[in-house]
Amino acid sequence: MDQIVTKAGRLVLLDKLSGFASPGGLAAAVYHLFTNNVTPTVDSVTGDFTDPVHASLASQAATGWGAAALGVADVGQAVATPLTWTNLSGGTVNLYGFYVTDGITGAFLFAARFDSAPQPLLNNQALILTPQFQDTTIYTS
């Protein structure tokens, strides 16, 4: 699945990476699931996405970011501690993907649609998502 970094998100992340801006970015990343049939683009905004209604599927802050490392084909990657959501809504929830905001500024950073969207999450079933960010990006004009 591709994570699409929005135009605004690129600027925020570049500011964070360069040390220009105050703390935030990946260190303060908040992951939100979304339940509507939308495909993220570089022009997406948080209002394009519908969060699940039930509290068991509420947004979560990413923690435990490790130092960036080079992987296959020298692609840099940072990985955080896996996030787990357990559906306690009493029914099935169809998930289409996730989007990420800066927990300090609220800035929209990036989003991804699940390759197999929609992904049904049955009652009492868990979804595990490992936050990661690579130094490759898809850009469409």
Image (cartoon, rainbow, N blue to C red):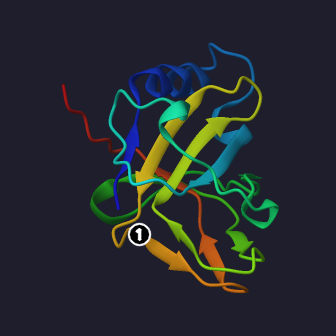
Secondary structure under the numbered disc 1 in the rendered image: loop
For disc 1, the marked residue is 118
Quadrant of the rendering where the N terminus is positioned: bottom left
Residue 106 image-quadrant placement: top right
Q: Position of residue 50 (x, y in %)?
A: 56, 47
**What residue is drawn where x is 55% and y is 51%?**
68
Quadrant of the rendering where the C terminus is positioned: top left
State left or right for residue 99 relative to residue 88: left
State left or right for residue 40 relative to residue 132: left
Q: Position of residue 80 (x, y in %)?
A: 66, 59
Q: Amino acid at mark 1?
A: Pro
Residue 12 image-quadrant placement: top right
**What residue is drawn where x is 73% and y is 77%?**
86
Nearer to me, 60 or 77: 60
Nearer to me, 34 or 81: 34
Q: Position of residue 29 (x, y in %)?
A: 68, 42
The correct choice, above or below, for 139 with respect to 118 in the image is above
The correct choice, above or below, for 132 with respect to 27 in the image is below
**What residue is drawn where x is 78% and y is 77%?**
88
